[in-house]
Image (cartoon, helix red, strand yellow):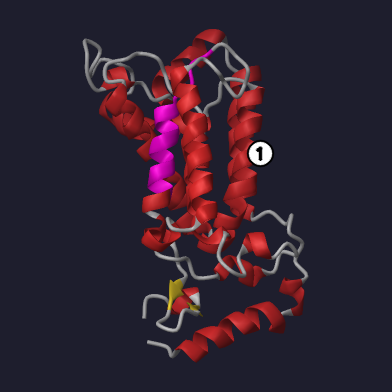
């Protein structure tokens, strides 16, 4: 294990010793976020301009998440078979209903995915994307077993990034306290969940977030303004996965003295 002073020296070097990185603009989006957003746009453009209505319907059947795949009279009969039963837990997140749906998810992913990608790195962020997407689908399945209405959109992942970001964003020296975009602000140690849930700012965020999703569930209000149901259960599933599983993906570890260990030393 490294002594706490080593961890502190590392953070100090990250914030002071690297002149190029301390001048990094706050809107410099990580490449993995750019790639994910580009893929979401490319999928939507392909569906909109290159697929016939019949082909688009087949795409939805193959890649949207349909609870009826797993119970009911259509179980085991939909195209794609067992492989689709597995991949649709994730692939539904790459499909969107319209440009407004895509735009809203893209903006929120940019806002909350950016600090998370800077902290996690490419591999961990992509793994987090897959897990929160699957958690959202699983939560929706628990409530809507047998239904044939397809679920699409990256909202569960976006919800997961929101939950994970609040685990460290409110910490002293974190992204919300360092508006100049210092790289070290993304490496502040995150408080344990039990301690984080005593932070009034985090509690307020949770109350507002769950309150909005309760409105989605009780009424017909939609962020897109369209007359279409909101899969709020998937939002909740992704959010809880991001909140509860954050530590499994987080490369920054807290020393006994409270300082951050460098990611490459976190496992030592």
Question: Which residue shows up at 59% across the image and 43% down it?
Answer: 109
Question: Which residue shows up at 51% across the image and 52% down it?
Answer: 202
Q: Is residue 71 above or below residue 105?
A: above
Residue 61: where, in percent of width, then height?
41, 18
Task: Residue under label 1, please give it.
Answer: 107
Residue 88: where, in percent of width, then height?
38, 30
User: Secondary structure under badge 1?
Assistant: helix
Quadrant for the C terminus in the image: bottom left
Residue 60: where, in percent of width, then height?
46, 19
Quadrant housing residue 3: bottom left
Q: Can residue 90 be seen in this view?
A: no
Q: Is residue 249 above or below residue 153?
A: below
Q: Can residue 175 be seen in this view?
A: yes
Q: Does the magenta stretch include residue 175?
A: no
Quadrant for the N terminus in the image: bottom left
Q: In this view, does 233 lie above or below 219?
A: below
Instruction: Name the dominant secondary structure of the magenta segment.
Output: helix
Residue 185: where, in percent of width, then height?
62, 68
* Left or right: where 52 falls relative to 71: right
Q: Give the range drawn in magenta.
A: 228-242
Quadrant housing residue 193: bottom left
Question: Which residue shows up at 76% across the image and 79% down it?
Answer: 19
């Amino acid at each position: 294990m490294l002594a706490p002073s080593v961890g502190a020296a590392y953070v100090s070097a990250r914030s002071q010793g690297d002149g190029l990185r301390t001048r990094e603009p706050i809107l410099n989006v990580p490449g993995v976020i750019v790639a994910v957003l580009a893929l979401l746009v490319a999928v939507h453009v392909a569906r909109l301009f290159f697929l016939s209505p019949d082909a688009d319907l087949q795409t939805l059947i193959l890649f949207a998440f349909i609870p009826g795949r797993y119970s009911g009279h259509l179980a085991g009969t939909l195209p794609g078979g067992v492989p689709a039963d597995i991949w649709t837990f994730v692939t539904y997140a790459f499909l969107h209903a319209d440009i407004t749906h895509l735009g809203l998810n893209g903006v929120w992913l940019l806002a909350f995915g950016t600090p998370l990608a800077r902290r996690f790195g490419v591999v961990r962020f992509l793994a987090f994307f897959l897990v929160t997407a699957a958690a959202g689908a699983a939560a929706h399945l628990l409530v809507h077993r047998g239904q044939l209405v397809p679920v699409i959109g990256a909202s569960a992942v976006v919800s997961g990034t929101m939950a994970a970001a609040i685990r460290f964003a409110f910490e002293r020296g974190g992204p919300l306290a360092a508006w100049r975009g210092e790289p070290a602000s993304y490496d502040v140690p995150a408080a344990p969940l039990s301690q984080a849930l005593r932070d009034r700012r985090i509690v307020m965020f949770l109350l507002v977030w769950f309150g909005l999703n309760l409105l989605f569930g009780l009424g017909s209000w939609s962020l897109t303004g369209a007359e279409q149901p909101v899969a709020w259960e998937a939002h909740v599933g992704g959010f809880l996965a991001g909140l509860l599983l954050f530590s499994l993906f987080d490369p920054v570890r807290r020393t006994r003295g409270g300082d951050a260990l460098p990611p490459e030393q976190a496992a030592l």
